[in-house]
Amino acid sequence: MGGTEKAISLEEIKNETVDLERIPIDEVFEQLKCSREGLSVAEGAQRLEIFGPNKLEEKKESKFLKFLGFMWNPLSWVMEAAAIMAIALANGSGQPPDWQDFVGIICLLVINSTISFIEENNAGNAAAALMAGLAPKTKVLRDGKWSEEDAAILVPGDIISIKLGDIVPADARLLEGDPLKIDQSALTGESLPVTKHPGDEVFSGSTCKQGEIEAVVIATGVHTFFGKAAHLVDSTNQVGHFQIVLTSIGNFCICSIAIGMLIEIIVMYPIQHRKYRDGIDNLLVLLIGGIPIAMPTVLSVTMAIGSHRLSQQGAITKRMTAIEEMAEKDHVVLLAARASRTENQDAIDAAMVGMLADPKEARAGIREIHFLPFNPVDKRTALTYIDSDGNWHRASKGAPEQILDLCKCKEDFKKKAFAIIDKYAERGLRSLAVARQEVPAKSKESEGWSMAISWVVASF
C-alpha cells in the first residue's frame, strides 16, 4: 500500500502538480520523498521507470517512409505522371507501352531520391555520433556512496555534485555551501555568469564557472527547462523558406508543362491530325524536358556538404536544411553588445585586454573582492577590488543610461553623451558606459564616493 502511495505521489511530481522550483528546500525533500543521503540503487531504478531516462526524446522515423518522402514533392509528381503516361496512355495504335521511357524515368526518380536519402541520413548519423560523444557524466550519491554515472540515469530526488567546469545534468536546487557562478548563455543568451545561492535553481545544460556544491535533482529529461524549450521548438510546423522555394518551382513547372501540353495537343491532333502514338511520344518529351531533374540532387549534395562541415566544427545538424533554416530571419538571434556572437566573450573586454602589453602584469597586485553579475534590472556589472596600495575601488560597466544616472551627471553632459551614442547607433553600433569610484569604507556593501564616468565605448 505504501508503495502505491509513493508511486502516485511520484506521478504527481512527474505531472508537475507541485512547484518544486519555489518551495523551501526542506519541502522539496519531503515532496520527493528523499533525503540528503541520496537514493538507493533500487529507488533510482524504480523512479527511472516512472520518470524515464534523463534525455530528450527523439522521434523514430521509418527509413522506408523517409525514403518515400523524397518522392513526394511537385517535381517528383511530374516525373511520376510521365512514368504513368509512358505505360498507360502510350499503349495504343497497336504498339506496346513505352517501357524504355518508363524504366528510365523510374530510375531517375529512384536515383534522385536515393542520393537525397543517403545524404540526409549521413547528416543524421553524424549528429547522432556527435551527441553520443557529448553524453555527459555526473557525480551522484547512491546507497550513501559517490560514483560517476551517466547523466541519463538521474531521477528527481538524486543528490548530485556540481563543481567547476561541470555541465549541470538536470534541473536541481542547490543545497548548503558557497554560491556558484553559473553560465546560462546556452539557455538565456546572457554571456555573463549568474550567481546562484543555496536554495536557488540551476538548469540543465548550464555550466559551472566557479564553486562546488551539492544539489538535489527536481526535474529530468523533457520536464527540464531545456527540455520544455526543445519541445516547443520541435512542435513547430513552420515550413522553411527552402521548401517554399522548391514548391514554388515545382508548381511553376507543373503549370508551364500543363499549358504547353494543352497547346501541343491542340496543334498535333485537331490541326496536324497526327497519329495517337506519335503525339504521346511528343508529349512525353515535353513532360520530361520541362522538369529540372538534376535540381533536387544538386541541392541535396550542396546542403549535405555544408551539413558535414558544420558537424566537423562541432555543430549538431540533424537535417540538411539546417543551413537554410539558420539563414531565415525568423531564426536570427540578436545579441546585446555585451555578448560575443562567436565565443561567448565580452568583445569590449577582449579589445581592452588586447591593448595591454602584458595583461597579467596589469592585474598584478589587484585582488577581486566582490563581483556583481549582470541582471536585466540594473543593466550593469560591477567589480569591487583592492589595488596594490591597499585602496578599495569599484568599477561598473553597463547600459549608458544606467551608468550616467549612477554618476549623477548634469543634463548638459547627458545630452552630449546621448548625442554620441545616437551617432554610434546610426552606424549600427551598440554602446556601453564605464565608470569607477573609490570605496574608502573598505567594505563591499559601502556605497563609496560618487561615481565618475570614465568612457563610452561602442561595439558591433
Image (cartoon, rainbow, N blue to C red):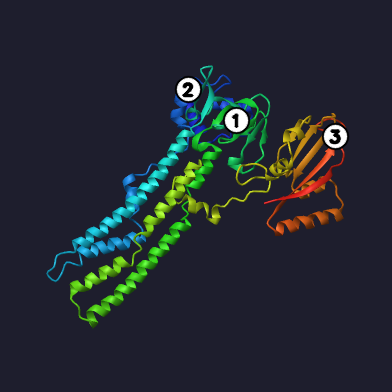
For disc 3, the neighbor class at 10 Å (few under 14, some 14 to 19, many from 20) is many
Q: How many marks?
A: 3
| C-alpha gap between disc 2 and disc 3 | 54 Å
| Pair 1/2: label in front | 1
Residue 188 higher or lower than 259, as above or below? above
Kind of element beneath mark 1: loop
Inspect the image, locate mark 1, and give the three-letter code of the amino acid beneath it. Gly
Q: Position of residue 13 (x, y in %)?
A: 52, 32
Q: Amino acid at mark 3?
A: Val
Q: Which residue is mark 2?
A: 43
Left or right: where 375 falls relative to 7 = right
Q: Secondary structure at mark 3?
A: loop
Disc sitting over residue 439 in the figure = 3
Which residue sits furthest bottom? 271
Residue 243 left/right relative to 365: left
Sooner in the amino-acid sequence: mark 2 or mark 3: 2
Task: Indicate the quadrant where residue 278 lies.
Answer: bottom left
Label 1 to label 3: alpha-carbon separation: 33 Å
User: What residue did someone put label 1 on?
Assistant: 165
- The residue lying furthest to the left in this view is 94
Local packing at callout 2 (Cα closer than 10 Å; few below 14, some 14-19, many 20+) is some
Please report the residue visible at 51 percent of the width from the left and 37 percent of the height from the top.
223
Q: Is residue 173 above or below residue 432?
A: above
Q: Nearer the viewer, residue 361 or 149?
A: 361
Q: Earlier in the sequence, mark 1 or mark 2?
A: 2
